[in-house]
Amino acid sequence: MAVQRYSYTAITLHWLIALLLAFQIALGWALEGNNSPELFQRFQLHKSVGIAILLLSLARLAARVVMQRPPASDGPAWTRALAGLVHSLFYVVMILGPITGWLLVSTAKVQVPTLLFGIVPWPHLPVGRGWHEPAEVVHEAMAWLAIGLFLLHVAGALRHQWLLGKPELQRMIPSARGKAVGAAVIALALIGGAFAVGSSVYPDRERAAPAEPVISDTAQAEPVAPPAPVEAEKAEAAEAPDSDPAAEPEEEAEPLADWTVAPGGRLGFTARWNGEAVEGRFDRWRADIRFSPDQLAASRISVKVDLTSADTGDGQRDDSLKSSDFFNTAAYPSATFTARDIRHLDGDRYEARGTLDLRGASKPATLRFTLRIEGDRARVGGTARIDRTAFGVGQGEWAATDAIAAEVDVAFAFTATRPAR
């Protein structure tokens, strides 16, 4: 006797794939033209869901071959042919869509390791870049085909259930005997909910809130006391009682010394992506400092930064920064700031003018810093602002400043020591 309902295995796979497809289509739609700071995380999620759909679809196809299923509904030949075509095309979408997405990832300029849902490593396909453009065309076509098939499939099921009075929904909805209306409403609500979530999904990570001033995130590593305003210093000097200059001992001049940066310093940066702050840091950098506040003309500062150590909290974004579109670390693994014109501004505030060598370009750069020397130990914190476009950081679609602002703020804080006098 032929079965009248699908197996629970087939039912489970059917609805799980349906929910994932609705979510995936909406998420892909949301990715179009999206340059938010979470773009890379959203793509990782999109890839993970795509591979999940591929694996579940292969399991569903195997179940369809092995397990007995209900006979096709009666009706005109054209309706049966259309139903068969829709089902066949669904398998094309569910299998070819993820495979073309896999090809896109495997042939991308930036080769980023894929971790399914951040856990399971997934390999790239061993194919050349020539596959990229065809895969992109087919992948987009699969998305539009899926939308059309969804509409046809739902319309066909509702037509059989209510216009023709055939219990089609009961065959594919668990425990739906005699309860087709309520079950159908729940099923459609779930599909609609999956689509809505996919279009607005936001990965679970803390947003990087804009910080004012830009040194705030950096200064947490080593607090630097703000300098007293010049007006306050003048007022204090005016209120101080007159004293005999001869009675006051003359301050000993600070000798020119080589300073060693202590572990625990921080070199951070803040970029603006659609107006939102994206913060990062460089984990490896070293400074060569020969300095005396009393011998600024002879002082010099040189800082070399390992660009491959950039960390923004997103592995895919970090790998993109190393690519030829941004830092191009294969050709230019480091950046160097060299300053020989160091000036005292007021109080504990200084300015260092020099040259920044980045990505093969050498441009003037200025940083301002606050310095507190206590014995043979100094606390330093400061900021600088550079124009990334002047150094070619951001090629192709990233050269424009409508998504990523041209100005990047750099902030640093560290302690340094000199040999005991």
Image (cartoon, grey):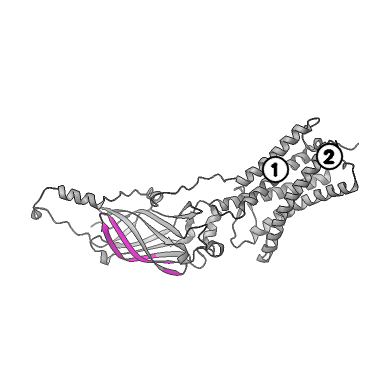
Query: Where does label 1 land, which residue?
Result: 19
Query: Where does label 2 land, which residue?
Result: 160
Residue 104 numbered mark, or none: none
**Quadrant of the rendered image containing residue 125:** bottom right
Residue 319: % across, % down: 54, 58
- Front position in the image: 298 or 172: 172
Mark yes or no: residue 94 visible: no
Please tell me which residue is depicted at 12% across the width and 54% down the height of the picture. 249
Position of the N terminus by quadrant: top right
Are there few (<14), some (14-19), or many (20+) residues within 10 Å of tag 1? many
**Quadrant of the rendered image containing residue 9:** top right
Secondary structure state at the residue bearing disc 1: helix
Which residue type does callout 2 highlight? His
Residue 80: % across, % down: 87, 47
Position of the C terminus by quadrant: bottom left
User: In the drawing, does residue 3 fall left or right of residue 346?
Assistant: right
Secondary structure state at the residue bearing disc 2: helix
> How many marks do you count on the picture?
2
- Front position in the image: 203 or 7: 203
